[in-house]
Each structure stands twice: as C-alpha cells, then as structure tokens.
Amino acid sequence: MASTSDIRNGLCIRYNHDIYKITEFLHVKPGKGPAFVRTKLKSVTTGKVLDNTFSAGHKIEEIRVETHKFQFLYEDGEFWHFMNVEDYTQIRLTENALDMPKLIKEGEVVTILINTEDNMPLSVDMPASVVLEVTHTEPGVKGNTATNATKPATVETGFEVNVPLFINEGDKIKIETDKGTYKERIKE
C-alpha cells in the first residue's frame, strides 16, 4: 500500500473497483486545516476522467506496471492491433485505451503500460509529437497572412487539425499528441 506522498504523474492505482492512471496531481497545504492532494484520474478501462481529492496520508493501492515498446499494425474498426517489438506477440486494444487514436499511423512505435498481475494492457503512451502528411486542405489565399488565421486540414490518418494558411497538401507537419494541435511544418 502506498500513501498520497507517493502520488506522481503516470502512477496507476486501484480506486473504486477500477484501475486509474494519475494524469495530474497537486499537493495542497492550506494555512488552516489538513493537507490534501487533488488528482485527475483517467480510467484505463473506460477512458473516463475523474477529479478526486485525497486527504494527506490516505492509503492508495498501487498497481505494478511494466512498459513495453509496441508497433501499431492496423485498426479494424473495433480494435487497434499492436505487436511487441521484442518478442513479436500481438495484442489488441479498444479505442478508449488510446488518448489520440487518430494520430497513430501504421508502423508507429508506442509505449504500452501492462499490468504485471494479469498481463492486461492498461494504456498507450504516445510520443510527444508525430509527423504526418497533409492529404487535404483548401489552398491559402495570398495576402491573408497579416492575422493568425488558420484553416482545417486532414492528415494521412484521417485526423483533422487547424493549420496556418501557408500549409498545402503534401506538406509534412508536426502535431502535438496531448492536445492534437499543429506545432510546426517540417522542412525536407
């Protein structure tokens, strides 16, 4: 059993008969009253995000996890299929185990957290950003760059993102995976 002093981002805990991953936390020590920890928990089974406050010293049940590198193979509409790059075993995950499923392209290597008790995959950690090619966007209008104007663009995985007007079809762009926002154009 761990306590609230052991809470950190990425920690997996068992809470209310479900497994949650801590995505954010804040230790609060008010001037009056006992200390507490505010957390944002994401269910690894349903994907639901929950705000919770633990009192200082509260016991939490920590889940032991291992991280493994997996390569994304394909998506069949219901499941996302991955292959372990070390022993070539394959697993399949539902869409709610992925934070940004539309940003993974075939062949991408990601880190998957696996529960050591029952070898169940818990969540997929994406890289901080991905480089994808723009497959469709409207052409930008010359002279309309005085403001910070954007336009929608569709990338090779089908994800739609707002990009600056100078981005054209065929350009490669970097997208931040945590927010799903445009970061920069990649020069080749």
Image (spheres, rainbow, N blue to C red):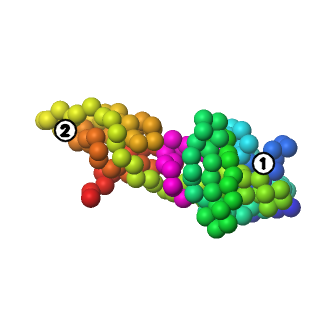
Residue kind at label 2, given as amino acid type: Thr
| Side of 142 relative to 134 (left or right) | left
Residue at the spot x=35%, y=33% of the render?
152
Residue at the spot x=84%, y=59% of the render?
117
Label 1, label 2: how far apart the Cα atoms are: 48 Å
Within the magenta stretch, is there residue 160? no
Looking at the image, tell me whether mark 1 or mark 2 is earlier in sequence order.
1
| Side of 131 relative to 11 (left or right) | left
Q: Quadrant of the N terminus?
A: bottom right
Q: Which mark is residue 145?
A: 2
Residue kind at label 1, given as amino acid type: Ile
How far from the left and from the top, in percent, is residue 20?
74, 48
Residue sitting nearer the eye, 37 or 32: 37
The reply to whether callout 1 and callout 2 are in contact (CB within 8 Å) is no
Q: Which mark is residue 19?
A: 1
Query: Which region shows up in magenta?
Result: 97-109
